[in-house]
Image (cartoon, helix red, strand yellow):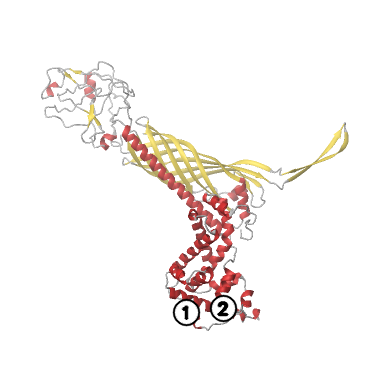
């Protein structure tokens, strides 16, 4: 009777508090997939944060160390005038220097000269207005009022004839790290001296170069995007990558998933590519090209239940003595490398930020897979034995997609100009293949996300 | 893989070792931990959810929270109790998202029906869980928290965002509805 007085809540508590009910089989794969997605998001955010920090640090270091010197990387030719100006002059608010006139050079008989581009300064009241500019060597510099870090050439107070003069010594070749500090004598009787309002009667000494003697000046070579806001870039790159693969079961066939997990392991990956980029509006890029990625995994299979029995006949002096039975366990051992090669056409948009000789660009976009090569071995879901795949065999077509489809991709590139038109770069990248590489009919969904770094070079056209 | 097939009994790792493995990010440890507790936690979810699908969703979301908040476990007290609390909180959040504005009140008027404990003993755990799941949302939540989990009415009211008096009345209503359901089962030919 005592039991009959037991209340409903007590009864239910007694029976249900520690009850156990088997959960549906699809719950764990969903939990695992969500955990993997979280891990991938965490890695991606760390990657982006790391890149942003590295880029910011690189910019800070470059800004603090870079002198504002620009050298023309090619000597002026008689029939050409090239205007290659350090865009930083513009970025720092100083107006771009004017072009050196060819006629001034050719009329003065200059054979070769270094042209120092200097910003246009407001002319002193008694300075002749002339369309021809001077040629200096070892132009002195001083800090500008607007930006103390910007070093600009200082004009002498005396009016200076705008005629080039032969140099006593040959000017240092482009790329030389030392700059001569020779003073220049300008003859007063020049063809244009009549244009000057107050021509000097005596030779005028140009201000001496205000450069540290013996200290090498590092010339920077930059492409003038301020004057050429559009340009074509061609990249070539190669690099290692880390392919993070995941295998999840599409069906309730968990033992098959476990077999695949037990027999396949990640090995190495690499990437290479050629890319054309169109720079427009100075800072924006559209990029496309051909990108090849190869993922290599190790397939290792050993069947512990495999038994091979061999019977050997034993002969001594031609006489049959008996048989020797040899039983070998686990002989069915295979090791091979599974290779997945993906050839894609990427399409990316980017934005580029520059600081003199260096800079970085951030890119993001999609890529379409046009060729998917695969070879190797996996466990056959039907026979549970290793089965080779590759080419156009029925097994290959049953397991893998013909092409892997779309991927999303992002990268941050840090580059360094070795010359005005060539630069080298390092570009960490991330790629997520949107769909599994296995077909929908295969019981296991095989996906990849790839982190890599591209080392390459760019030519600017 | 079901809990009966789970290799819990053969897993030599202790609970703390499993937890530490999960904190290190070991996928195998996470899986083993899931298999160790999924059966009991699914039963908890079945009590709180309206449908089996909801129970599976709660179980999935609950384990995601367990793994993401695992570092908050101080290795003091029962880990199963900690996991259960996470699961109950997840279930209650699901309940609060889904609860009906108007509760069914038809069963309130039925008189109390004495229930033979033998009748209850004949029912499987699954059937008892079904009875609980058939309760209206509010009754079910209070019944689970107060009658089975052992929270007080004050604690249950706070967790559900209701008045303590509401909690008491809903427990009474839940009890009567269960008694009625059990009485109906007693009158079936199977039980006669």
Q: Which chain letter matches label 2? A: B
Camera sees residue A382:
yes
Camera sees residue A392:
no
Q: Residue furthest right?
A: A319
Taking A27 as reference, is A460 above or below it? above
Q: Is residue A388 left or right of residue A328?
A: left
Query: Residue at image x 25%, y 33%?
Result: A150
Taking B151 as reference, is A47 above or below it? above
Query: Residue at image x 53%, y 57%?
Result: A30
> SS at mark 2?
helix
Q: Which label sits on residue B105?
A: 1
Sequence-earlier tag: 1 or 2? 1
> SS at mark 1?
loop
Q: Which label sits on residue A456?
A: none
Query: In x, y percent, where is residue A372?
Result: 53, 44
Q: Quadrant of the C terminus of chain A?
A: top left
Q: Is residue A303 left or right of residue A239?
A: right
Query: Circle 2 is placed at which residue position?
Result: B181
Query: Residue at image x 88%, y 36%?
Result: A320
Q: CA distance from mark 1 to mark 2?
A: 15 Å
Q: Quadrant of the N terminus of chain A?
A: bottom right
Rendered image quadrant of residue A297? top right
Query: In x, y percent, where is residue A294?
Result: 53, 40
Q: Which chain letter matches label 1? A: B
Query: Badge 1: few (under 14), some or many (20 or more) residues near its Cα, within 10 Å?
Result: few
Query: In x, y percent, where is residue A195?
Result: 13, 24
Front position in the image: B181 or A130: B181
Query: Residue at image x 54%, y 53%?
Result: B19
Front position in the image: A57 or A138: A57
Number of numbered callouts drawn: 2
Query: Badge 2: few (under 14), some or many (20 or more) residues near its Cα, within 10 Å?
Result: some
């Amino acid at each position: 009777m005592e039991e009959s007085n037991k209340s409903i809540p007590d009864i239910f508590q007694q029976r249900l508090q520690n009850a156990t009910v088997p959960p549906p089989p699809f719950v764990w794969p969903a939990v695992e997939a969500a955990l993997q997605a979280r891990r991938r998001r965490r890695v991606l955010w760390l990657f982006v944060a790391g890149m942003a920090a590295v880029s910011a640090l690189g910019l800070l270091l470059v800004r603090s160390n870079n002198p504002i010197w620009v050298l023309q990387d090619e000597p002026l030719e008689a029939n050409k005038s090239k205007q290659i100006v350090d865009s930083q002059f513009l970025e720092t608010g100083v107006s771009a220097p004017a072009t050196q006139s060819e006629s001034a050079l050719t009329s003065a008989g200059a054979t070769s000269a270094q042209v120092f581009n200097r910003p246009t300064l407001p002319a002193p009241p008694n300075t002749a207005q002339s369309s021809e500019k001077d040629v200096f060597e070892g132009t002195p510099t001083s800090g500008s009022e607007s930006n103390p870090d910007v070093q600009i050439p200082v004009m002498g107070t005396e009016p200076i004839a705008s005629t080039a003069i032969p140099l006593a010594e040959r000017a240092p070749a482009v790329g030389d790290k030392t700059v001569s500090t020779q003073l220049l004598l300008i003859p007063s009787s020049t063809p244009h001296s009549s244009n000057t309002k107050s021509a000097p009667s005596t030779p005028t000494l140009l201000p001496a170069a205000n450069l540290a003697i013996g200290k090498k000046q590092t010339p920077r070579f930059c492409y003038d995007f301020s004057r050429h806001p559009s340009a074509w870039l061609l990249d070539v790159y190669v690099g290692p990558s880390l392919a993070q693969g995941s295998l999840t079961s599409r069906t309730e066939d968990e033992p098959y998933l476990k077999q695949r997990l037990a027999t396949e392991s990640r090995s190495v990956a690499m990437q290479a590519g050629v890319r054309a980029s169109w720079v427009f509006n100075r800072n924006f890029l559209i990029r496309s090209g051909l990108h090849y990625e190869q993922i290599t995994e190790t397939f290792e299979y050993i069947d512990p239940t495999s038994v091979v029995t061999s019977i050997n006949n034993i002969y001594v002096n031609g006489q049959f003595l008996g048989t020797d039975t040899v039983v070998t366990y686990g002989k069915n051992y295979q090791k091979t490398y599974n290779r997945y090669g993906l050839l894609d056409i990427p399409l990316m948009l980017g934005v580029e930020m520059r600081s003199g000789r260096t800079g970085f660009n951030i890119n993001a976009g999609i890529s379409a897979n046009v060729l998917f090569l695969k070879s190797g071995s996996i466990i056959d879901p039907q026979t549970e034995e290793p089965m080779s795949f590759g080419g156009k065999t029925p097994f290959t077509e049953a397991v893998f997609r013909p092409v892997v489809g779309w991927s999303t991709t992002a990268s941050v590139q840090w580059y360094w100009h070795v010359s005005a038109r060539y630069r080298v770069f390092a570009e960490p990248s991330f790629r997520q293949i949107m769909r599994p590489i296995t077909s929908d009919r295969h019981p296991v969904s095989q996906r990849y996300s790839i982190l890599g770094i591209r080392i390459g070079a760019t030519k600017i056209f | 893989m079901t809990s009966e097939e789970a290799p819990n009994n053969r897993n030599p790792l202790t609970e703390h070792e499993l937890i530490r493995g999960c904190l290190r990010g070991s996928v195998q440890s996470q899986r083993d931990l899931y298999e160790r507790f999924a059966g009991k936690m699914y039963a908890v979810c079945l009590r709180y959810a309206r449908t089996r699908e909801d129970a599976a969703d709660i179980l999935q979301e609950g384990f995601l929270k367990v793994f993401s908040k695992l570092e908050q476990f101080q290795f003091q007290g029962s880990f199963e109790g900690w996991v259960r609390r996470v699961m109950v909180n997840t279930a209650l959040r699901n309940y609060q998202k889904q609860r009906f504005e108007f509760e069914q009140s038809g069963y309130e008027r039925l008189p109390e029906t004495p229930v033979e404990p033998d009748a209850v003993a004949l029912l499987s755990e699954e059937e008892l869980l079904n009875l609980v799941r058939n309760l209206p949302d509010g009754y079910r939540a209070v019944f689970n928290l107060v009658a089975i989990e052992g929270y007080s009415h004050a604690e249950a009211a706070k967790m559900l965002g209701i008045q303590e008096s509401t909690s008491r009345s809903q427990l009474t209503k839940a009890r009567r509805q269960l008694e009625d359901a059990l009485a109906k089962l007693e009158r079936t030919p199977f039980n006669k």
